[in-house]
Amino acid sequence: MYGVDDILGIVGGYRGFYSKNTVKLTPKVVNDIHKRGGTTLLTSRGGHDTVKIVDSIQDRGINQVYIIGGDGTQKGAALIHEEVEKRGMKVAVAGIPKTIDNDIAVIDKSFGFDTAVEEAQRAINAAHVEVECVENGVGVVKLMGRYSGFIAMHATLASRDVDCCLIPESPFYLEGQGGLFQFIESRMKENGHVVIVIAEGAGQEFVAQSIHDVNQKDASGNRLLLDVGLWLSHKIKVWSTSFISSITIACDDLDPTYMIRAIPSNASDNIYCTLLAQSAVHGAMAGYTGFTVGPVNGKHAYIPIAVSNSLSCAFAALIPPYAKKILDYDMGDCFAAVNKSLLR
């Protein structure tokens, strides 16, 4: 609608700016990508070299960069924006929040979260069916959530089949009064089975103590998470020998995390993604930079990129920018700004 013809897809995440070929994106190329899971542009961990990335942006003549993804690369996006400002380049940098974890600050919800919760319910339902079919069944379902338990908690609230939900934000303990084992015992006597949902980042300190972890990190600098689902299942099995003659673990560490990540987005996320994309383009075309888009208290807004958490797969457009800085804009102001820009 803005008459832009040259839109480039950066292949392979941040590293793709300087080590991969680009692909030209057209309406025909992206016609059905919303029906597929994953990312057609590929993604990667690490590889963020701010100087090389901005050099590539400058050499290619790119003047609008849209960076899509989660909290892990928000710092990188902020660094790109800072380097662009430092060089005095007329390049707009916009972030679009896409992460199933929903752990991006300020905004109400990230793209992918609704789909993840919907799929997580299916895993919980499978675990519930299994534990109902055996005597003293305990099902442990591990869901994604490194630092936050949004998927685990929302899937728990939606399913109604979960007895206990463990998340990183709320510390727990196993033994003693009020501990997890005591809770399992009481629920077992009451229902004859238990379903436990645990976010992957919960209880990491306990697992590390058990196996004397050396705190390894991935390519992005994040601590490698230990398998808390497997650890919890083992602990319950050991404890069960002192409680009843046997507690059958019907779903021994059910881990659907990558199945959840790989599915196509649902109808709700498809609509939401469209709104985020249009907001980002309108903002950049209105002359703003260093922002991410998303709803805040129900109103779509522009937020300083350093405040929010987004980014990972990137695509860029070659268009004349007006870019300056933004602090906070709601959608009404956004469209007013776009109209003024077009009038100019």
Image (tube, rainbow, N blue to C red):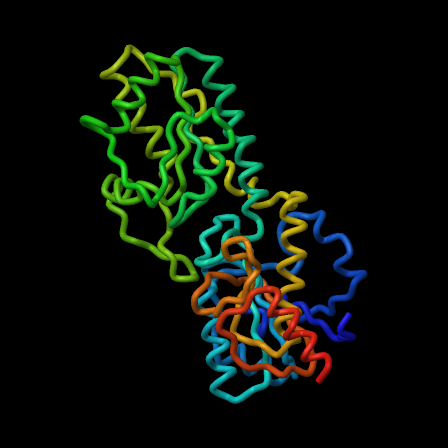
Q: How many marks?
A: 0
298 vs 234, left or right, is right
Identify whether 155 is placed above or below 222. Answer: above
Determine the residue located farthest toward the bottom in the rendered image.
88
Q: Residue at x 47, y 15 (%)?
A: 132
Identify whether 77 is placed above or below 60. Answer: above
Q: Residue at x 60, y 69 (%)?
A: 333
49 vs 323, left or right, is left
Q: Looking at the image, which is closer to me, 223 or 175?
A: 175
Q: Looking at the image, which is closer to me, 7 or 273?
A: 273
Determine the residue located farthest toward the left in the rendered image.
176
Toward which corner of the image does residue 231 lie, by quadrant? top left
Does residue 13 appear in the picture of this structure?
A: no
* Residue 122, image x, y percentages: 56, 30
Identify whether 183 is placed above or below 230. Answer: above
Q: Quadrant of the C terminus?
A: bottom right
Determine the residue located farthest toward the right in the rendered image.
28
Does residue 256 appear in the picture of this structure?
A: yes
* Residue 24, image x, y percentages: 74, 69
Q: Looking at the image, which is closer to me, 179 or 273?
A: 273
Q: Residue at x 47, y 35 (%)?
A: 255
Q: Quadrant of the N terminus?
A: bottom right
Identify whether 29 is placed above or below 263. Answer: below
* Residue 13, image x, y percentages: 56, 65
Q: Residue at x 33, y 32 (%)?
A: 232
